[in-house]
Amino acid sequence: MTSEGWGTPPVEPIGQHYIVCGGNALAHRLVLELVEHYEVPVVVLVPDRTRDHAPRIEQLDGVAAVVEYTSVTEEALRAVRIETARGIALVDGSDQENIHAALSAQGHNPGIRIVLRMFNQRLGSNIERLLRNGTALSGSATAAPAFADAALSRPNSVQVGDRFLHIAYDDDIAADRICVVADRIDRQDLGRIRLLPDQEGDSASFVRLAGEFGDGGPIRSATEARRAAEPGPVPEPATLANGIAALQTLPSEPAVRIPWWRRLRWRLLDTLRFFTSARLRVVLITALAAVLFAFALLWYLNGNFAWSLYASLLDLAGAAQPDQPGTGDGSGTGGTWQRIAQVVITFCGITFAPVATAIMVEVLASGRRGQHRSPGAGTRDHVVVVGLGNVGTRVVAQLHGLGVPVVGLESDPQARGISAVRALGVPVVVDDGPLAEQLRRARLKHSRTVVAVSGDDATNLEAALEARAVRPDVRVVLRLFDDSFASHVYATLDNVVSRSTSYLSAPAFAAALMGREVLGTLSVFRHVLLIAELPAELGTGLIGLNRHDLEDTGGVRVLAVRLARSPRLYHWNYADRTRTLEPGDSVVVAATRSGLARLNTTLTENA
């Protein structure tokens, strides 16, 4: 590793290039996006050429140079020719380091496009005001919804206006779908999936056959018709019927399928666990049960509910009354069993005072010590999140906000996500012992899903296999970087979902570096579909284009149009395909990564 102030020699004179600072997985994916889809020259600034993803970045075709500096210093920026660059992406380091580097880059090149990764989104929105041409994005915030939705077995959605776009598969596809976004879906071979296939009408196959055979052509079955209409090997009818994904809109975000009474029970148990330890809960529950039983006995023996409640409350408060003679209405504490009940209530009331004091002392002491809470015996139907890094913390926060029971699991006691999760009141298991034991403590047997989102593929796969060894039917959501690895997992394990944080977030960073706003990403297994809104303004290249022009680039579908005269109204599946865009209009598109890159090139040429 080079020391501070030392690096590789400056790159050869170059201009109009893009700089990526970082050697992590996100930097790797981002460089791939830029060199393969946008086909622009890229210079990469890495902290160590021998570690993390730096060696693989160096082997990528299209990378102009790889420069090594331990941090993004003034000297490092000059070495990567910051003064002639078109854009810079800061996707490694802390929020503070990225802010400092962004301001330094702007000082060297006032017109440069800056995209920086920020975990603190609120701070990022404030930093954008200090940058003339900059955007702050969070990779974990972009990817976390896909993991959370996969854990709940519900479709991931992106909000556009007052509607939510989501991907529906096979039998869940409704008649009012916007468009087909993928076909040839086969879990055993994910490489066959086609994103945004050529759009044709429902009668396209029949028109093609009619032209081929004329009026005297032979009659064919549906499968034979598809074989003639579609080149290449055609799968069996069952695969054809289950291999399509479509984009649909919903008036509201897909609901979480958890009964309200389960949420209420979780909240009550969670609150009780927050204020009491296991021993104190036993004391409280025992005393409360004794009080309720004694009250029921008083009520049964004298038959007067109001008087029984009055006497019980006085006894709980320590103001026990001596024996009172029974009256005609049934009031009074005469009788042996009524006296016993009164004594029980009085002593339980005396117990509550020291227990309340112990609870307050424990809460204050645990808060000062910063201790985490372990899941209690009442934890049921919860989600276990393995790895409390940036992504894991976001996933826990999102699930907790939806009212879903969740338990965090982390092997590193110094992980910064532990304090954030503990602040939400979420139980955490912190242990560097065997993973099987950690999962047992997280009450895996009673969980609904295991989400493994640590930064290491092997650790995530180990968590999945350990979970399946204990519960073969548990749903598993994995964070995997390697596509080939993920394909083998899909082909081997059932009820498993794989996502890649860098794969989900890199297209958004690349589009932002090119000046395009991405509203969100949708997953079709390991493939990514981008939802972007493009405003038709002077200099954007959109003015004068219509739907045909935009979709001819390939890999792009126009979903909705907003007209300048009614900017709040989205016209979904806008019927007039020949109307050209005017200043003030905007279009919402669904695009593949390469499709959005080609569209960006077309618009740049038109501008």
Image (cartoon, rainbow, N blue to C red):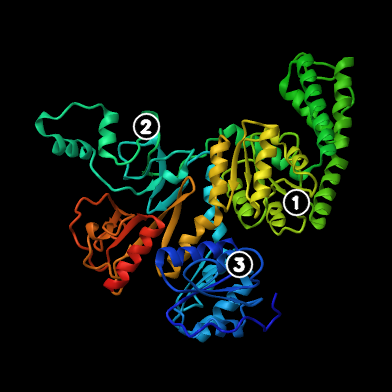
The mark nearer the N terminus, 3 or 1, is 3
3 and 1 marks in contact (CB < 8 Å): no
Mark number displayed over residue 54: 3
Is 512 on the left or on the right of 126, as rendered?
Answer: left
Amino acid type at circle 2 is Ala
Q: Which mark is residue 411?
A: 1
Residue 162 % position (x, y) = 38, 51
The residue sitting at the left extreme is 215
Q: Choose the circle earlier in sequence order: 2 or 1.
A: 2
Task: Please identify the quarter of the rendering in which residue 563 is found.
Answer: bottom left
User: Total number of numbered labels?
Assistant: 3
Residue 158 in view of the camera:
yes
Residue of label 2: 241
Q: Decide: few, some or many residues near mark 3? Use Cα within 10 Å; few <14, some 14-19, many ≥20.
A: many
* CA distance for labels 3 and 2: 43 Å
Tag 3 and tag 2, C-beta contact below 8 Å: no
- For the residue marked with disc 1, what is the amino acid? Ser
